[in-house]
């Protein structure tokens, strides 16, 4: 139930993000979800792609600072308070959400959200024990 996410450290220079997406596109790697957080000099591009290991290898070969991180993809009710309900299941167990972002494409009528937490296996157990759908990586990559 773990999803591999690429994290790419990008200089805040024109063309860097375009080059990453160009490399992925040239190699038929499809972006499923993405998020960019930036500072003055650098940005962190977080990507879920259909072929994470291949994307990692290709970006590394092109001298990008890239890493693979384990995250969780969770189905969240697409209504007011839906995300809050999911997050409340983790709160009593002191599971801290480091960051999260949503998917562009939906697998159902519900929303999909990517979570990064410190204790990933514990979080998955808590979520599934509470009836919350956690997607396998293979499912997420094929959306």
Image: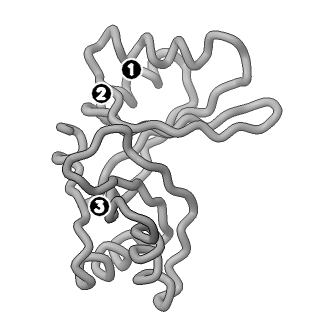
In the image, residue 85 lies at what x, y percent?
A: 41, 77
Residue at the image position 31 percent from the left and 73 percent from the top: 124
Name the residue that disc number 1 marks.
58
Instruction: Please determine whether, in this image, residue 33 is positioned above or below residue 87.
Output: above
Whole-percent x, y for residue 69 in the image: 44, 50
Q: Quadrant of the N terminus?
A: bottom left
Q: Secondary structure at mark 1?
A: helix
- The residue singled out by tag 3 in the image is 75
User: Quick one: label 1 or label 3, which is nearer the N terminus?
Assistant: 1
Q: Residue furthest bottom?
A: 92
Q: Position of residue 13 (x, y in %)?
A: 72, 16
Question: Which label sits in the foreground, 2 or 3?
Answer: 3
The crowd level at tag 2 (other Cα within 10 Å; few <14, some 14-19, many 20+) is some
Q: Residue at x 26, y 31 (%)?
A: 51
The residue lying at 21 percent from left, 47 percent from top is: 107
Report crowding for label 3: few under 14, some 14 to 19, many 20 or more residues within 10 A (C-alpha). Answer: many
Q: Earlier in the sequence, mark 2 or mark 3?
A: 2
Disc 2 secondary structure class: helix
Q: Are marks 2 and 1 in contact (CB under 8 Å)?
A: yes
* Residue placed most toward the observer, 51 or 130: 130
Residue 14 vs residue 54, the one in the foreground: 14
Mark 3 element type: strand
Q: Is residue 42 left or right of residue 86?
A: right
Q: Quadrant of residue 36?
A: top right
Q: Residues within 10 Å of mark 1 (few under 14, many from 20)?
A: some
Give the residue displayed 24% in from the left and 84% down from the top: 129
Position of 13 with respect to 75 (left or right) is right
- Quarter of the image holding residue 128? bottom left
- Residue carrying label 2: 54
- The reply, left or right, for residue 79 in relation to residue 35 is left
Location of residue 142 with respect to 130 vertically, above or below: above
């Amino acid at each position: 139930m773990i999803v591999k996410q690429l994290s790419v450290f990008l200089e805040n220079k024109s063309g860097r993000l375009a080059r990453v997406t160009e490399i992925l596109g040239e190699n038929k790697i499809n972006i499923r979800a993405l998020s960019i957080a930036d500072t003055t000099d650098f940005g962190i591009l977080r990507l879920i792609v259909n072929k994470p290991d291949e994307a990692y290898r290709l970006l590394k070969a092109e001298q990008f600072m890239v890493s693979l991180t384990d995250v969780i993809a969770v189905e969240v009710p697409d209504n007011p308070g839906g995300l809050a309900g999911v997050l409340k299941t983790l709160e009593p167990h002191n599971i801290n959400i480091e960051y999260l972002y949503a998917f562009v494409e939906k697998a159902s009528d519900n929303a999909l959200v990517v979570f990064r937490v410190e204790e990933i296996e514990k979080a998955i157990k808590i979520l599934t024990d509470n009836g919350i759908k956690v997607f396998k990586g293979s499912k997420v990559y094929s959306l």
